[in-house]
Amino acid sequence: MTHDPLSAVMEATWPPARRWREGAFDFRDGAGGGKRVSAASCEGDWDAADLDRLGAMAEPLVMIRPSDAALDAALAARGWRIVDPVVVCSAPIAALAADLPPLAAFPHWPPLAIAASLWAEGGIGAARLAVMERVRGAKVAILARHEDRPAGVAFVALHGTEAMLHALEVRPDRRGRGVGGTLVHAAANWAAALGAERLSLVVTERNTAARALYARLGMEVVGQYHYRMK
């Protein structure tokens, strides 16, 4: 992708099962792994035939980035609706790394059964675990504990000197107790040990609690996108 540097990081750290080019668009088969690995994206100058091709998708879904304003308007005119506006948050690793209490977070791979169970509780099932398995670079699951109980989990992967955090889940009865922050700090610690310089993540605009947490940690909004669905 050429639209922004983080696009390549997202693709490498949360990859589709298959990706191919038709006309001006890259298409993806996410194998049930969610919108990010299933959406088409514009990679060149498009025309009406390209839009017709999009409409013929089995599940028509397109990622719209800031540089896709004309495409956004064209799809809106064809009746495609906006789904899940997302913001990208990022910060230098050095600003996020922190000393954590012993056993507060446990980086490991492959995911422990309890990590998979916590993800399942949050709706992250086998198809998204398969996305994690497809990542070819360095990757890790992080299990967070609070009051000697499993409390949250996250997935982190590297692409060059960029780290990206995905699938952060905190048990409902552990929320508001610093578990999310622990996971972000642990992700930064793990990535720093491998030479990463920046940690990023994506979060839906409507998730105000998570966005407030990331802002408190010093993560800034550096990008945004949304989807159009027919």
Image (cartoon, rainbow, N blue to C red):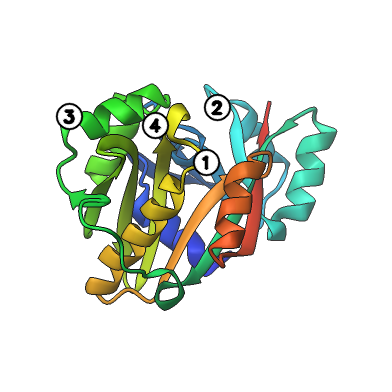
Could you tell me if the residues under marks 3 and 2 are in contact, i.e. CB atoms within 8 Å?
no
- Quick one: SS at disc 2? loop
Q: Is residue 118 visible?
A: yes
Could you tell me if the residues under marks 4 and 1 are in contact, i.e. CB atoms within 8 Å?
no
Which residue matches tag 4? 33
Count of numbered marks: 4
Which residue matches tag 2? 57
Label 1 – label 2 distance at C-alpha: 41 Å
Label 3 – label 4 distance at C-alpha: 19 Å
Image-quadrant location for residue 40: top right
Q: Is residue 53 visible?
A: no
- Quick one: SS at disc 1? loop
Please report whichever mark, 3 or 4, sits nearer to the chain's N-terminal start.
4
Label 1 – label 3 distance at C-alpha: 24 Å
Please report whichever mark, 4 or 1, sits nearer to the chain's N-terminal start.
4
Q: Residue at x 56, y 56 (%)?
A: 214
Please report whichever mark, 3 or 2, sits nearer to the chain's N-terminal start.
2
Q: Residue at x 27, y 34 (%)?
A: 149
Which residue matches tag 1? 176
Q: Amino acid at mark 3?
A: Ala
Label 3 – label 2 distance at C-alpha: 36 Å
Instruction: Rate crowding at label 4 as few (under 14), some (14 to 19) or many (20 or more) other CA atoms within 10 Å.
Output: many
Relative image position of residue 59 (x, y in whole percent):
55, 24
- Observer-side mark, 1 or 2, equals 1
- Tell me if residue 91 comes above or below residue 80 in the rendering: below
> Which residue sits furthest right?
77
86 or 190, nearer to the observer: 190
- Observer-side mark, 3 or 2, equals 3
Q: Residue at x 59, y 28 (%)?
A: 60
- Observer-side mark, 3 or 4, equals 3
Which residue matches tag 3? 113
Q: Amino acid at mark 4?
A: Gly
